[in-house]
Image (tube, rainbow, N blue to C red):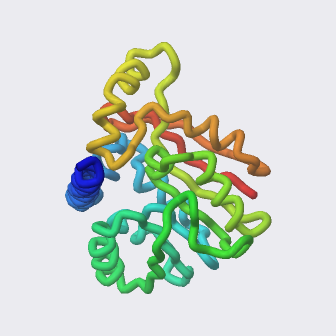
């Protein structure tokens, strides 16, 4: 009876997890086209920040968690793009976006802690709103360092924890359990910047900015160099 109950329990957990991933994929597909707009101010929108951040990409570019492909329109046409997307329910959206843009993509199976790429083989790694949801951010950053060529760059746009002692930080901490469920593992109060600074990059250059998104308004954008 214990074995049967365990099997049933495991099956229920897998069903719940699968539903969560399907729901998140659908939610991403509905919202990704408007994210750049709602998270921008009058003078300097996120779209402008992305254009500037991705302007000089070349060679092999590995994107972690590309989701529905919302970054694809910002990339130069001549790069070799590799995507690592662990949620299989997002793959169809991603391929559709690539086809719409007439881009050749190399979509691989894996996750942020185990990147399907050889050591010292990638010119640039890209992460936008991904480090908040990886199970172990320290392992993820070490994986990024492993695959980057010497002098390679890690480009990031991530939401981060609000400053300690603020009402927003308290709210992030309170809502975190339910936020992680509906956000496919997203931690609204993760200290991403501290992890980046302690990962072992030769340099980490970043800028803080705020968006009009609820709960996760504090963001950072920048470049970490191996």
Residue 139: x, y in percent?
62, 51
The answer to whether residue 177 is above or below residue 153 is above
Specify the quadrant that holds the C terminus.
bottom right
Q: Residue at x 28, y 67 (%)?
A: 89
Given residues 63 and 209, the one toward you in this image is 63
Residue at image location 44% in from the left, 86% down from the top: 104
Tell me the quarter of the picture where residue 126 sits.
bottom right
At horizontal 49% and vertical 36% (from top left) the residue drawn is 160
The extreme front residue here reads 1
Camera-side residue of 98 and 91: 91
Q: Residue 146: x, y in percent?
A: 71, 63
- Does residue 17 appear in this view? no
Q: Is residue 82 left or right of residue 212?
A: right
Residue 20 percent coordinates (x, y): 25, 52
Q: Is residue 118 visible?
A: yes
Q: So how many labels did they put on this image? A: 0
| Residue 161: x %, y % from top left | 48, 31
Q: Is residue 19 above or below residue 183?
A: below
Residue that appears at 71% across and 40% down: 198
In the picture, measured across the screen, residue 179 lies left or right of residue 56, that is: left
Compare residues 101 and 129 and report the one nearer the observer. Answer: 129
Q: Quadrant of residue 39?
A: top left
């Amino acid at each position: 009876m214990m074995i049967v109950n365990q099997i049933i329990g495991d099956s229920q957990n897998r069903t719940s997890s699968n539903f969560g991933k399907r729901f998140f994929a659908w939610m991403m597909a509905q919202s990704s086209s408007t994210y750049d707009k709602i998270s921008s101010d009058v003078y300097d929108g996120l779209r402008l920040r992305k254009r500037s951040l991705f302007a000089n990409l070349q060679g092999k570019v590995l994107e972690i968690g590309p989701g529905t492909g919302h970054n694809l329109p910002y990339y130069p046409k001549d790069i070799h793009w590799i995507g690592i997307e662990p949620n299989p329910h997002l793959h169809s959206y991603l391929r559709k976006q690539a086809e719409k843009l007439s881009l050749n993509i190399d979509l691989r199976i894996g996750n942020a802690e185990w990147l399907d790429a050889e050591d010292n083989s990638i010119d640039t790694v890209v992460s936008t709103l991904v480090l908040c949801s990886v199970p172990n951010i320290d392992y993820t950053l070490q994986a990024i360092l492993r695959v980057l060529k010497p002098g390679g760059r890690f480009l990031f746009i991530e939401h981060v924890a609000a400053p300690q002692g603020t009402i927003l930080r308290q709210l992030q901490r309170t809502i975190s359990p339910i936020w992680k469920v509906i956000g496919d593992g997203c931690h609204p109060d993760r200290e991403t910047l501290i992890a980046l600074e302690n990962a072992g990059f030769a340099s980490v250059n970043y800028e803080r900015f705020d968006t009009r998104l609820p709960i996760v308004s504090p963001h950072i954008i920048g470049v970490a160099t191996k």
